Every structure is written in structure tokens, then in C-alpha cells.
């Protein structure tokens, strides 16, 4: 499912940047303030953020210690379902996947629930056979296995192996959530936030779910809770509380939270304004290849805000973000190459990056390209 977010700030050109190419010249760098993000996406964007791992039944090593491989084979051949299941896991660990499935099928046919759940996993990941995966997850789900219930919900939500149904997905997530399955609770929070076919948004319900998960230490939930407080979704808007939750998540190296915390420091929302602190948090996220943060660090070096001014450092950070596909950074790299600002002048590279920016939707790059070509 998609998690949509609302932009916090209006985009506008930075006073020192001018917003790009004027009609008679080129050379201004592209600056704009970003919106609070979720999972690396900004203004009007979205990103898939359902938890998809869910957990699986793992190998019981004590069982191996108690029984040799030969004893497991003997017990499995005599119809011992637990032995069949553990022998299947043994073959999985040995990457003998056909043998793994063979033994787990024997156990599943005798209604051994962990084997059915594990077969659901095998068919989805090893075979990409989602219909079979759904069949075995459902077999375990109706027996009350919370991991299987989660995956049934996920398959319904994504329309894999079964017709897509958000209402059915929610039903199965709820069953698993009642057994304290955290990933199911998380996905319920996302569904209640955005709604969808057959499900109306329930922001207060979404908020309560994420608040509960945040309080037990789930980093992603702490990040989302900060986002909800910033935008006043399901709760009264409170920048100060948003800062507290973003800080908790940021201290656990959550890059989006680090970026959002930097944004709040930069704008003095919920906390005393500090360009130095904004730079510090942008840099932490930028070092995790967070593109928006790399662009922001480049801006701070370019303007000398929160850090000593350096065109060379600005260029290096713009280049990192540009090579990860950020159109504004591609534009700035192009202008830098044209002007020889922070790098050696190179018109060919300038045009290359400006064309990349144009291909990524930054229309003002065309003006820069036209101006550069008239000067050649």
C-alpha cells in the first residue's frame, strides 16, 4: 500500500539561489525548502512502507541436538510430523529446496501448522508461486497462526495469488494484531491512515496504533508518529512533540527522521532554530545516501549556512545526490561544471547533467541548456 504525506512547507526559491535561470543568463543554483517526508519521499509523493517480513518459524536447533540427522530421517519416514518439518528446515538450511518442500508438504498434509506457514514462505520466495503461497498461508491462518494471518493479509493487500481486497487484508491483519503481531498492527495503521477501496480513512485510529507501536520502541512507528504530529493527522498538531519522536527515531539512524529533524531545526519549529543542528542532522542522513539530505547539505555548503562556505564541498554533495537521480542536484552539478564552481569547468559534463535534470522533469534545465549552447 501507499503512504501519502502532506508537504509541511511551501516550495520557494532561496534568496541567494534565485530559483534557476533567468531569461537573459544562467547560473543560479536550484534551492527550495522541502516538505516533511516519509520514507524518502517529498511533496505529494508516496512510498510503499508496509512491513513485509512478518517473521517465520525458525529452525529449532535444540531439536537437532536431541536427534541426529539419521534419527530425524527415520522419524520422518515413520510419519512424525515434527520430524518431517524439521527435516524440511534442515534441507532449507542446506539449500536443498526441493527436499525441503517435499518434507514440509508431508507435514502440512497432516495439518502441522508450522509446516504450512513455512510452505507459504517457500512458495512465495523460492517459487514465486503466489497462488500456492496463499493456499498454504491460509491453511495455517485459519488454524490461528499469526504469522500466516499476516501474510494472508499481505497477499490480499497486494493482490498476489488472490484477488486484491483491502477489506480482506484488514480482516486478516486484525486477527494477527489481536495476537500482538507487530507488523500486522503497523500495516493496519497505514491502511487506517490512507483508506482505500472499501475502507474509509480513520486518522485517529491510525494515530493510536502508531502511538502504541512507538511506545514499545518501533523506530518506523516513532518516525510516522512524528509525521502525524507535524501535520495534525489524527491528533492536534504539535511540532514540539513531533521533534521528540523524530529525535527518538533519528537517534536510531532512521534517515527520514534525521532529515525531518534537520528541517524542523532549520525552520525553528517545535525547537529553537539552529542552522548548525540542521546541518548536523542533514549530514547524518546524507551519509546514509538520503538524497534530499545530500541536496540540503550541498545547499548549506553553497550558502555557508550552518557550516563554513565551500563550493567544493557543495559540489561533492550535489554530485552524490545527482548520481542518485535527484533532478535539482543534477541541475546544480550542471551549472557548477559550466561555471567551474567547486570543480574544473567542463561544458560537456555540464550539458550532460542538465539533460539528466530535464529528463527527470526539471523544465528550467532547458533554459540553462539553451543559454549554454548560445555561448559556445
Image (cartoon, rainbow, N blue to C red):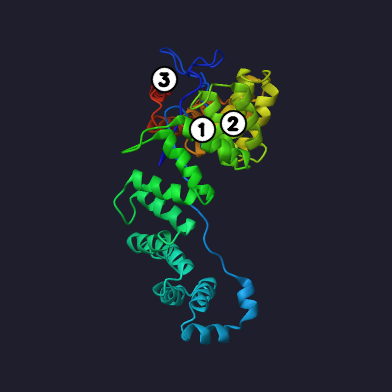
Is the residue 133 above or below the residue 208 in the image? below
Query: In which quadrant is the C terminus drawn?
Result: top left
Answer above or below: position of 284 versus 30.
Answer: below
First of labels 2, 1 by sequence position: 1
Element type at mark 1: helix
Is residue 55 in view from this perspective? yes
Q: Which residue is mark 1?
A: 207
Is the residue 103 above or below the residue 257 in the image? below
- The crowd level at tag 2 (other Cα within 10 Å; few <14, some 14-19, many 20+) is many
**Which residue is found at the position 46% from the left and 74% from the top?**
100
Task: Give the label, 3 or 1, closer to the camera.
Answer: 1
Mark 3, secondary structure of its residue: helix
Which numbered circle lies on residue 259? 2
- At label 1, counting other C-alpha atoms closer than 10 Å, the crowd grade (few under 14, some 14-19, many 20 or more) is many
Viewer-side residue, 208 vs 246? 208
Seen from the viewer's position, the closer of residues 294 and 254 is 254
Disc 2 vs disc 1: Cβ atoms closer than 8 Å?
no
Judge from the rendering whether residue 1 lies leftward or rightward of residue 165; answer left or right. Answer: right
Residue 93: % across, % down: 54, 71
Query: Percent from the top left, x then y, of residue 304?
Result: 66, 20
Q: Which mark, by number, is residue 66?
A: none
Q: Disc 3 designates what residue?
A: 371
Q: Earlier in the sequence, mark 2 or mark 3?
A: 2
Q: CA distance from mark 2 to mark 1?
A: 21 Å
Amino acid at each position: 500500500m501507499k503512504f501519502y504525506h502532506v508537504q509541511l512547507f511551501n516550495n520557494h526559491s532561496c534568496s541567494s539561489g534565485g530559483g534557476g535561470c533567468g531569461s537573459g543568463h544562467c547560473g543560479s543554483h536550484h534551492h527550495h525548502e522541502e516538505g516533511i517526508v516519509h520514507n524518502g519521499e517529498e511533496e505529494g509523493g508516496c512510498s510503499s512502507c508496509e512491513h513485509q517480513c512478518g517473521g517465520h518459524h525458525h529452525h529449532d536447533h535444540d531439536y537437532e541436538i536431541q536427534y541426529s540427522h539419521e534419527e530425524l530421517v527415520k522419524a520422518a519416514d515413520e510419519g512424525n510430523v515434527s520430524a518431517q518439518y524439521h527435516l524440511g528446515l534442515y534441507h532449507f538450511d542446506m539449500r536443498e529446496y526441493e527436499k525441503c518442500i517435499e518434507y514440509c508438504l508431508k507435514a502440512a498434509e497432516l495439518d502441522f501448522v508450522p509446516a504450512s506457514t513455512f510452505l507459504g514462505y517457500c512458495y512465495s520466495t523460492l517459487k514465486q508461486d503466489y497462488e500456492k503461497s496463499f493456499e498454504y498461508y491460509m491453511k495455517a491462518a485459519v488454524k490461528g497462526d499469526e504469522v500466516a494471518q499476516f501474510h494472508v493479509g499481505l497477499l490480499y493487500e497486494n493482490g498476489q495469488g488472490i484477488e486484491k481486497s483491502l477489506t480482506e487484508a484488514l480482516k486478516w491483519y486484525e486477527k494477527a494484531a489481536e495476537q500482538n503481531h507487530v507488523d500486522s498492527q503497523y500495516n493496519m495503521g497505514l491502511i487506517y491512515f490512507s483508506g482505500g477501496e472499501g475502507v474509509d480513512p480513520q486518522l485517529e485510529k491510525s494515530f493510536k496504533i502508531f502511538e502504541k507501536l512507538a511506545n514499545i520502541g518501533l523506530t518506523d512507528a516513532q518516525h510516522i508518529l512524528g509525521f502525524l504530529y507535524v501535520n495534525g493527522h489524527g491528533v492536534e498538531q504539535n511540532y514540539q512533540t513531533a521533534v521528540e519522536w523524530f529525535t527518538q527515531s533519528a537517534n536510531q539512524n532512521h534517515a527520514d527522521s534525521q532529515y525531518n529533524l534537520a528541517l524542523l531545526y532549520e525552520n525553528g519549529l517545535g525547537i529553537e532554530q539552529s542552522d548548525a543542528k540542521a546541518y548536523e542532522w542533514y549530514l547524518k542522513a546524507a551519509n546514509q545516501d538520503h538524497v534530499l539530505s545530500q541536496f540540503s547539505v550541498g545547499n548549506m555548503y553553497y550558502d555557508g549556512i550552518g557550516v563554513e562556505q565551500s563550493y567544493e564541498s557543495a559540489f561533492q554533495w550535489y554530485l552524490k545526490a545527482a548520481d542518485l537521480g535527484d533532478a535539482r542536484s543534477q541541475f546544480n552539478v550542471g551549472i557548477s561544471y559550466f561555471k567551474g564552481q567547486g570543480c574544473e569547468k567542463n561544458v560537456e559534463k555540464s550539458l550532460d547533467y542538465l539533460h539528466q535534470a530535464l529528463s527527470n522533469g526539471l523544465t528550467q534545465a532547458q533554459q540553462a541548456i539553451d543559454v549554454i549552447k548560445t555561448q559556445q
